[in-house]
Amino acid sequence: MCYGLLIILDPLDDYYALLGVDEGTDAAQLRRVWRRLALRWHPDHAGPGATAMFQKLSAAYEVLSDEVARASYDRRRGTRTGTDTAPATPVTPRRRAPGVMLARLCGSLKVLLSCGVARYAEGDIIELFLSAREAAQGGMITISMRVPVRCPACGTRDARAASCARCEGQGTVEELFSAWLAVPPEVADGAILLPSALLPGMIRRVRFRTRVRPLRHKV
């Protein structure tokens, strides 16, 4: 069987300070900062000791990269961003994934497939089987897998690729990719989840689909 523990963020963490940005940082700059920090702190590069920090950074980015969640966080934090002008049409806030790792669903894709936690579906979709409790709670998932990317040495299949020692003329190589997924509370069965960031030169965008197992009632 596959087991996991829940890792919860400290509610006192300052998300702006964690990412090293100020309250006025726009979405484009925030994305650039996140990519730089992700490369620095990802456990695949920085080692297992960086896991806790990477999880905190990921949760902070998930909140600050969403307009509604960021405004709510700013109100709780006691800051103000943007203008006081109300939107012309009402906006329905999306429920955000809490800063909790659903560790039963985290790990190597090969292991998750062997445990029956994941399976390949049609096209580029991978299905993840959530318990009713996990679906109701929501949280963060990270799944590692190898994916094809454009060869960083030659970048394409042309005359340069033919003499490329890294890809041996194929124009692509396989790299380790960790897909970070945000599962909102009360996620629906069949919901599509997209990784929060992709590898540079990634050929195909991997998609995940939730499959919620119903509660089993004792007779």
Image (tube, rainbow, N blue to C red):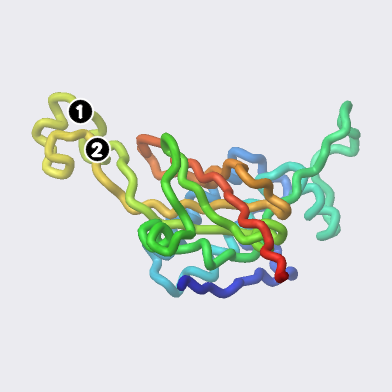
Q: Mark 1 packing: few (<14 Cα in 10 Å), some, or many (20+)?
A: some
Viewer-proximal residue among 214 and 188:
214
Instruction: Check residue 157 in the rendering and tell me which mark sits there, or answer none.
Output: 1
Whether residue 20 is visible: no
For marks 1 and 2 on the same chain, the one whose residue lies earlier in the sequence: 1
Report the disc number at residue 172. Answer: 2
Whole-percent x and y of residue 159?
13, 25
Q: Quadrant of the C terminus?
A: bottom right
Query: What number of labels is visible?
Result: 2
Residue 49 is situated, as x and y percent measured from the top left of the image, at 45, 74
x and y percentages locating residue 6 in the rendered image? 61, 72
**What's the mark number on residue 5?**
none
Q: Is 197 left or right of 217, judged from the image as shown?
A: left
Circle 1/circle 2 CB separation < 8 Å: yes
- Amino acid type shown at disc 1: Arg
Most foreground residue, 124 or 71 = 124
Residue at 56% in and 64% down: 55
Q: Residue at x 45, y 57 (%)?
A: 143
Could you tell me the amino acid type at mark 2? Thr
Taking the image as shown, residue 119 lies to the left or right of residue 163, namely right
Residue 139: image location, x then y, percent: 64, 59
Left or right: 21 as drawn, with respect to 180: right
Q: Nearer the viewer, residue 15 or 1?
A: 1
Within the image, what quadrant is residue 154 found in?
A: top left
Q: Crowding near pointer 2: few (<14 within 10 Å), some, many (20+)? A: many
In the figure, 50 relative to 81: above or below? below
Confirm whether residue 157 shows in the render. yes
For marks 1 and 2, give the CA distance: 8 Å
Q: Residue furthest left?
A: 163
- SS for dot 1: loop
Q: Nearer the viewer, residue 33 or 43?
A: 43
